[in-house]
Image (tube, grey):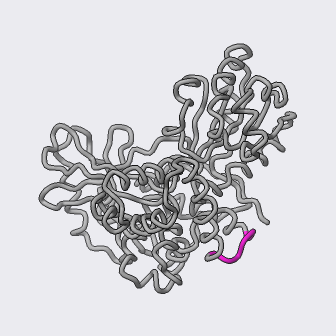
Amino acid sequence: MTYINRNMEPVFQSLSGEYPAVLITGPRQTGKTTMLQKLAREEGRDRVYVSLDNIKDRALAQKDPEMFFQLYRPPVFIDEVQYAPELFTYIKIHIDTNHRPGDFWLTGSQLFKLMRGVQESLAGRIALLQLLPLSQNETEAPRKAPSPVLSGPFKPDLDYLMEKQKHRKPAGLSEIFSRIFTGGMPALASGQYSNRENFYQSYINTYLDRDIKDLSETINSLKFYTFLVAVAARTGQLVNYASIAEESDIDHTTAKNWLRILETLGIIFYLHPYSNNTLKRTIKTPKLYFYDSAVAVYLTKWSSVETLQNGAMDGAFLENFAVSEIVKSYYNAGLEPFVYYYRDRDNKEIDLVLERDGTLFPLEIKKTAAPESRLTRVFSSLDNVSLRRGTGAILCMAEKLSAFDTANLIVPIRLL
């Protein structure tokens, strides 16, 4: 099995040299444990490893955290720490007493924003990262160390993209949809498993089912699967709790709660609408996306790259892929992505609005290889906001980086 270098590695190493504790969260099977075990071997410290997936160790951590840390002394790598929030107080005490960088490496399969106990106990003492499924940048060069050019956060900047284009291979429509179909799980990309269908079936039935029941014991598995399919069918769309609830035979409140579970487990995320005091006519409903497009593809039962590429959801999945690639590029760099969409009551819509350094960058996502300049007209909707409007871009299937003019680029999706 080939180890795929992660863009986050240098970020993690830098933070571990500064903070007493570093926590990496993200969905299961995205390579958190594998990456940290590799970095631990390179580190040269005698770092002990313990996984709270192990019932015996989990029980000890929950019932007797003090004894747990007598057995597993820092520097320590604790996997799946969300199972024992009781440890956080003891980690805080150790940090306040010893002040040693890198004493605690932690992972969790629930996003840190939603994990009980972290913010309250370890605020200011812990660095937080989120590792998502593999990005295009990582799968294209699995054996190479992360490059600053390839691994940095996406920006619609001509010089940055021209440099990036020098290092990236051509990728046409079929190749991009193959990436959407296969997904970004390291176990598939590295060759550990070859059967995509079996992998995602196991992923849904084992990992999600187990974690979902851990968060809510009252969930009906069959109804939840129907709910998952209904959610996947709405990727890239405005969230409509009523229609999801009706299709899943559940009530409105349950649909909201179950979406919260998917967000907690790092399966879905939202783009919220961009608005400020000068934009009175924007709508307020978020749009829903999957971090790994292939999970949604599997749930909606597309059987091949060809049927997906030519099917009714091709545009939605291409949008999901492009948005998730941009979001990954920020998290992999240890940065929070400030990304939104724009839609007003006159139905003017911008697929993605990236906020960076006091500037808004409007981005449209299209399946075409030859976009028309009229697609950029909607970008003027941002002219009346308090922030400056920066370079816009059409993210599309063009073969090469190009431009309509100095303010609007044509960016191949392979360069995300």
Horizontal and vertical percent position of residue 410: 37, 66
Corner quadrant of residue 71? top right
> Which residue is at a point 83% across and 25% down the rendered structure image?
70
Left or right side of 173 for 252: left
> Which residue is at a point 64% across and 27% down the rendered structure image?
88
User: Considering depth in this image, is 61 or 223 the residue closer to the camera?
Assistant: 223
> Which residue is at a point 60% across and 47% down the rendered structure image?
109
Horizontal and vertical percent position of residue 83: 64, 40
Residue 388 magenta = no
Q: Is 403 above or below relative to 194?
A: above
User: Considering depth in this image, is 102 or 372 the residue closer to the camera?
Assistant: 102
Horizontal and vertical percent position of residue 183: 57, 68
The stretch of residues the image draws in magenta is: 191-196
Q: Is residue 362 visible?
A: no
Q: Is residue 7 visible?
A: yes
Tell me how many marks there are. 0
Corner quadrant of residue 204? bottom right
Horizontal and vertical percent position of residue 275: 23, 44
Q: Is 324 above or below relative to 86?
A: below
User: Considering depth in this image, is 390 or 28 the residue closer to the camera?
Assistant: 28
> Which residue is at a point 33% across and 63% down the rendered structure image?
244
User: Considering depth in this image, is 409 or 333 the residue closer to the camera?
Assistant: 333
